[in-house]
Structure formats: structure tokens, C-alpha cells
Image (cartoon, rainbow, N blue to C red):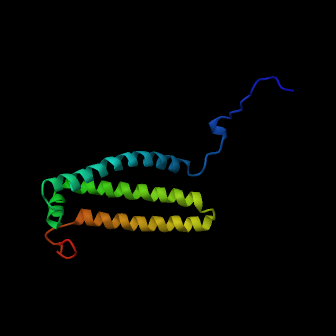
Amino acid sequence: MSTGRTIYFNPSRAARPQPENAGFERFMWYFMRISGLLLVLLALGHVLIMHVLVQLAGKQIDFAFVSSRWGTPFWRIYDLLLLLLALVHGVNGARIVIGDYVRRGGLRAVLIGLLVVISVLWVLLGMIVIIFFNPATAPRVGPFS
């Protein structure tokens, strides 16, 4: 027997169990939005400065240019921020894709573990290069030297 009324049942939030990693997932949800916006701004700044303004000024991007650029803390911090945001943003996206498409828990854990190890190594390598770069001791070898 229908009374024509719709009754909605909405238990309180406290009564519903929260997923174990709800805090982490919420943090990463916000991180993806904020880092995406910052990455757009940083990447556009990078392209504008490195590939438009420098080329218009008639300069060439070579070892000497990068050495002088990294001679100031601003550009090291800028490049480090670009590196960290891009890597963490991309790795988190890959983690989400693995979680969506890999159903077997063991395989998913192994893939995410490999992703974390590889990304930590890449971050450390990039940080070492940016932080400890010294043009006086850097060898002039390679295709751009």
C-alpha cells in the first residue's frame, strides 16, 4: 500500500564505517587538483622562459646556460618543485590506474610496490642532480657539451 510519500533513510556519518585509507585517499584527491594546477603554471612558465624567451633573445640552451641558471637558488627550487610535483602527480595517477584495473590483490600490491620504489629512485636521482650540481666540477661530456 503506497501513501505517495518517499521516505529517505540517511544514517549518520558516524554510523557508516569509513574505509581504512579514507584520509590518504582524500588527501591525494586534493593533492591531484592542486598539483595539477601548479604543474600547468610551472610548465607554462618553463616553456615560456626556456623555449620562447631564451630563443627570442638569440641565446642557446647549453651547459653554460643551465650552469648559470642553476647558479641561483630560485631556479633550483623552481626546477625541484616542477620535478617533485610532476613525479608525485604522475605516480599517483598510475597508482589509481593500477587500483582500477588490477583486480588480484597480490599483483596489485607488487605493482604498486614497484611503482613506489622506481619513483623514489627517480625523485632521489633528480634531487641529487639539482641540489648538488656544481658547474666547476661537472665534466663536459655528452651530446650537449
Describe residue 29's horizontal placement relative to residue 104 as left or right: left
Residue 92 rendering spot, x and y as whole percentages: 46, 56
- The residue depicted at 55 percent of the width and 48 percent of the height is 22
- The residue depicted at 31 percent of the width and 54 percent of the height is 81
Q: Which quarter of the figure has residue 108?
A: bottom right
Residue in front for this viewpoint, 43 or 128: 43
Residue 106 rendering spot, x and y as whole percentages: 61, 67
Q: Quadrant of the C terminus?
A: bottom left
Residue 11 sits above or below residue 92 on the image? above
Describe residue 101's horizontal placement relative to residue 142 as left or right: right
Q: Quadrant of the N terminus?
A: top right
Q: Which quarter of the figure has residue 3?
A: top right
Which residue is outermost to the right? 1
Residue 51 rendering spot, x and y as whole percentages: 23, 56
- The residue depicted at 44 percent of the width and 59 percent of the height is 91
Residue 137 sits above or below residue 26 on the image? below
Q: How many marks?
A: 0
Residue in front for this viewpoint, 140 or 16: 140
- The residue depicted at 43 percent of the width and 57 percent of the height is 90
Residue 143 rendering spot, x and y as whole percentages: 22, 74
